[in-house]
Image (cartoon, rainbow, N blue to C red):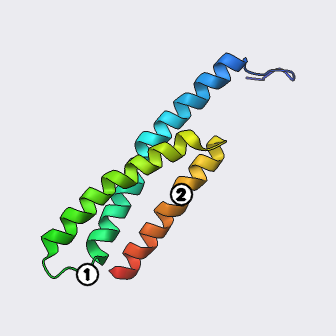
C-alpha cells in the first residue's frame, strides 16, 4: 500500500497518538524501571536482615514508578521520554548484573 507524497496526520490525530504513546510508555516503561530498580536495590542494600532490604526496595519502587510517569508526560518529545526511561533501566540492570 503506497502512502501519498503529501500525506500527514491532522493535529488532532497526532495529539491523540502522542497521548496514547505516552500513556503506554508510562504504564509499561514505568513498571519496568520500577521492577529493575526494586530488584537492584533489594540485592544491593546493605542490610543484614534481607526482608528489610526487600521491603525498603519495594517502597522505593513506588517512588521510582511515580517519577517515571511524571517524566514521560513532562518530556518534550516521546523520543526523549523513551531515552529518559531507557537510561535508568539500563543502569539498574547493569547494577543488578554486577551484584549477582
Question: Which secondary structure, mark 2?
Answer: helix
Which quadrant holds the C terminus?
A: bottom left
Question: How far from the left and from the top, in percent, is residue 95?
Answer: 42, 75
- 3D distance between C-alphas at marks 2 and 1: 26 Å
Residue depicted at 32% across the width and 56% down the height? 61
The mark tally for this picture is 2
Q: Position of residue 23 (x, y in %)?
A: 48, 34
The residue indicated by pointer 2 is 86
Is 12 drawn above or below residue 41 in the view shown? above
State left or right for residue 6 relative to residue 58.
Answer: right
Residue at 23 percent of width and 64 percent of height: 56
Q: Where is residue 79 in the image (x, y as percent from the top left)?
A: 65, 46
Looking at marks 2 and 1 on the same chain, the residue that comes earlier in the sequence is marked by 1
Q: Is residue 28 shown left or right of residue 5?
A: left
- Viewer-nearest residue: 49 or 83: 49
Question: Looking at the image, which residue is at 37% across and 62% down?
Answer: 36
Q: Which of the numbered marks, if any, corresponds to residue 46?
A: 1
Q: Crowding near pointer 2: few (<14 within 10 Å), some, many (20+)?
A: some
Farthest residue to the right: give it. 5
Is residue 95 visible in the rendered image? The answer is yes
Q: Which residue is drawn at 62% across and 41% down?
A: 78
Q: Nearer the viewer, mark 2 or mark 1?
A: 1
Q: How crowded is mark 1: few (under 14 residues within 10 Å), some or many (20 or more)?
A: few
Left or right placement of residue 9 versus residue 40 in this view: right
Instruction: Judge left or right: residue 77 versus residue 97.
Output: right
Quadrant of the snapshot with the N terminus: top right
Q: What element carries label 1?
A: loop
Which quadrant holds residue 38?
bottom left
Above or below, 96 relative to 27: below
The residue nearer to you, when weighing 90 against 6, is 90
Amino acid at each position: 500500500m503506497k502512502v501519498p507524497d503529501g500525506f500527514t496526520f491532522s493535529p488532532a490525530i497526532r495529539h491523540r497518538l502522542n497521548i496514547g504513546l505516552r500513556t503506554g510508555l508510562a504504564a509499561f516503561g514505568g513498571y519496568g524501571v520500577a521492577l529493575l530498580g526494586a530488584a537492584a536495590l533489594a540485592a544491593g542494600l546493605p542490610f543484614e536482615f534481607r526482608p528489610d532490604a526487600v521491603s525498603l526496595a519495594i517502597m522505593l519502587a513506588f517512588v521510582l514508578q511515580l517519577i517515571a510517569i511524571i517524566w514521560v508526560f513532562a518530556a518534550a518529545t516521546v523520543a526523549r521520554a523513551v531515552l529518559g526511561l531507557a537510561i535508568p533501566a539500563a543502569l539498574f540492570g547493569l547494577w543488578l548484573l554486577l551484584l549477582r
